[in-house]
Every structure is written in structure tokens, then in C-alpha cells.
Image (cartoon, rainbow, N blue to C red):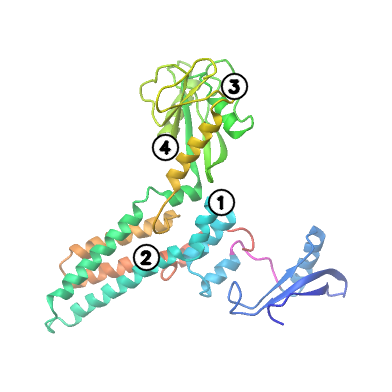
Amino acid sequence: MPRRAVVRALRDADDGLLDRAMVLWLPGPGSYTGEDSAEFHLHAGRAVIDAVAAALAVHGLRPAEPGEFTRRAFLNGKMDLVSAEAVHDLVAAETDAQRRQALRQLEGALGDLYRDWSDRLRTALARQEALIDFPDEDLPPEVEADLLASIASLRSEIESHLDDAQRGEKLREGLWFAITGAPNVGKSSLINALAERDVAIVSATPGTTRDAIETRVVLGGVPVMLVDTAGLRDTVDPIEAEGVRRARSRAASADLVITVIEAGAPIGPGSGGLIVANKSDLRAEQRSGIVPVSALTGAGLREFRARLSAEAVALTQSSGPPPLTRARHRTALAAAARWLADAHDVVEPELRGEAIRLALRALGTITGQVGVEDILDSIFREFCIGK
């Protein structure tokens, strides 16, 4: 009976017992892929799984390719490409914030937004085609004025969507926080304390850290890569000098720079981001805006972690429409916005119609309505095997 779980003995071609398993028959189109499918809920032993797989192979079945089930669901119209990508993000989610973002996208919030824009573009294109096909019908001037207004409004909405500081992508991919400062101020001790394990070598000898050392932590539900960098100072040692150059480069590209100084010490020129005064157990630190900590005693570390968590949330939290989550979406939306700008500014009606059509095509590549065959392989090969 469809969609009814039953326990059955699974046997091979020689009638040998493989397992007693729960079996489900799921006829299409009411299945994940839209096709007829069956599920075997096996005991999880490796030998059981291998034996059942071998028995199925005798009947011509094969292991699924990475992402094949979700790809089939997309090709069979069970979901759009935005939702299919959300499946991957949900499986790969490491934190609760990533899970919530993926679920929101999987439920269709982002796809609904893009489809609404596509519907409005199709209406605009129909109006433009009417202006082209019936030039002698004395259509009221308000028709073209309304058309231009709708194009401008849609372009404004897309550009506003793009102007999001890449919050969705940062949450999906994780943030980078660079820990910088002069040698021997306790940067390595701090990163060890935040990671709650020995990541970096701690030594009283200045310049111990020569290259960037990375470790992944979760702050405020956001994955963050902490980068311990070489101490910033002038040096004639070519290896240390290269470490200083790399430290400055990592700081320049980081989402947040954490500048570490010794408690009570002056703030050096060029210091920015979040300033942390380490070694507060040796000297009091009460300056406004500076976070006092002691990596040695643990004083202030809880407050420091809370501050970093707040920074991580602020860099990824969004309100209103669901945020962009992939560079592919951003590229297509930017192209649509450019074509809409051309459509608004051009005078010739045929050229305006073509610009609207190209903007519509750019939006369609996001949801998978048009022109996505060349990118399907690159999207689904990221999936886990079978999903």
C-alpha cells in the first residue's frame, strides 16, 4: 500500500536473508523527486548496507550521484533552483542561524520574491509590446509613463536587495575575524582562549607567530574563522617581514579586525576595529570603548566573547525580505538591474523591449526558469552523495 511503512524480509537472488527492514513505497508524483520511489530503512551495519546495495545492483540499480535526487526534483518541477540550493545549505548548516536561513529559503520566500519580480517584468514587457505593435492606436500617454514608472520601481527594489552588505552570503559561508597587534601582547593566548584549545604556540619570545593561524568557532550562531596574525613591527628578518605583510593583508580583507594592546598601553596609529586590552591582571584598563581581558586569568573573556558574538550577529542579521545567499544570485540580479536601467533610459521602443526581455531572462536564471543547463552540474556536484 502506498505511503504505509511495513516490515519485510529482504532477500538476495539466491533467497538468502539480507535484513528485516522497514519498507516504504512512494509513487509519483507525490514523492520527493516526483517519480516512483521506494525507501528501505535498514539496520545500520556496514555489512547489511553493502549486501543490500549489491543485491539491488543485480537488478540494474546504481548509487545516486551527488545531488541527484534534488536535481531530479528540480527537473520534474517539484522545486525551483533557489529551493534546491537551499537543500544543500540546510544539509551543510553548522549553526542554528545557518539552519534558519536555509529553511526560510527552502520554504520559498526568496523564490517567491524573484517570481513576483518576473511576473511584473512580464507585465511590463506586454505593455511595451503593445506600444510597439499598435503605434497608430492612439494609446494614452499614461501607458508609457506607467511603464517607465514600473521599470524604475522594480530596478529600485532589486538594487535595494543587492545593497545588503552581503549578510546572507556571510552567514552561509562564515565570517573572518583577524586578530592583530604588536608582538607579545597576547594575541595567540586570546585565540587559544576563544577556541578553548591550543591552536597557536604561546611564547614570551616576540615574533613567535610568523604566519596566519586559523581556527573556526561559532559566535552568536554564526561560524567565524579567527585568524591569529604575526606581530606588527618593523623587522629586518625576511621571514618575519613576510608574516607582517600577510598580517596586514588579512586584516584588510577581514570582516572584523580585533586589535590587541597591553592594558594601559597607548593605542598605536592605524589601530581599528574592536580594541582589546590584554593583561588586565597586571594593569587596570578603564578607557571607554576598549574591552579589558586577561588571557592568563580568564577575566573579561566572557564579556569579550559576548561582544564578538554581537558583532557577528550584526554583520549577518537581516530584516525584511530574505537575504541573498549566493554569488550566482547576486550576479544575475546585478545584470537585471543594468538591463532595467537601459530599458528606462532608451528611447527606441524595440530596444526597450529587448532590454526588458534580457532583464527577465537574468531573473529566470536564478529560479531555473530559463538558461540554466550549463550551471546545473556546478550546482549539484556540491551536494552530498544521494541527496
- Check if mark 3's residue and mark 1's residue have beta carbons within 8 Å: no
Residue 248 horizontal side relative to residue 84, left or right:
left
Residue receiving disc 1: 96
Residue receiving disc 3: 296
Secondary element type, mark 4 = helix
Magenta segment, principal secondary structure? Answer: loop
Secondary element type, mark 2 = helix
Dot 2 crowding, Cα within 10 Å, few <14, some 14–19, many 20+:
many
Q: Which residues are magenta?
A: 61-67
- Nearer the observer: mark 4 or 3; the answer is 3
Name the kind of residue labelled 3 in the image. Leu
Q: Quadrant of the C terminus?
A: bottom right
Secondary element type, mark 3 = loop
Measured from the top left, where is residue 265 in percent x and y?
43, 16
Q: In the rendered structure, which disc, 2 or 1, sits on the residue that comes first in sequence? A: 1
| CA–CA distance in space, label 1 to label 4 | 26 Å
Residue receiving disc 4: 253
Image quadrant assignment for residue 188: top right
Name the kind of residue labelled 4 in the image. Ser
Q: In the rendered structure, which disc, 2 or 3, sits on the residue that comes first in sequence? A: 3
| CA–CA distance in space, label 4 to label 3 | 29 Å
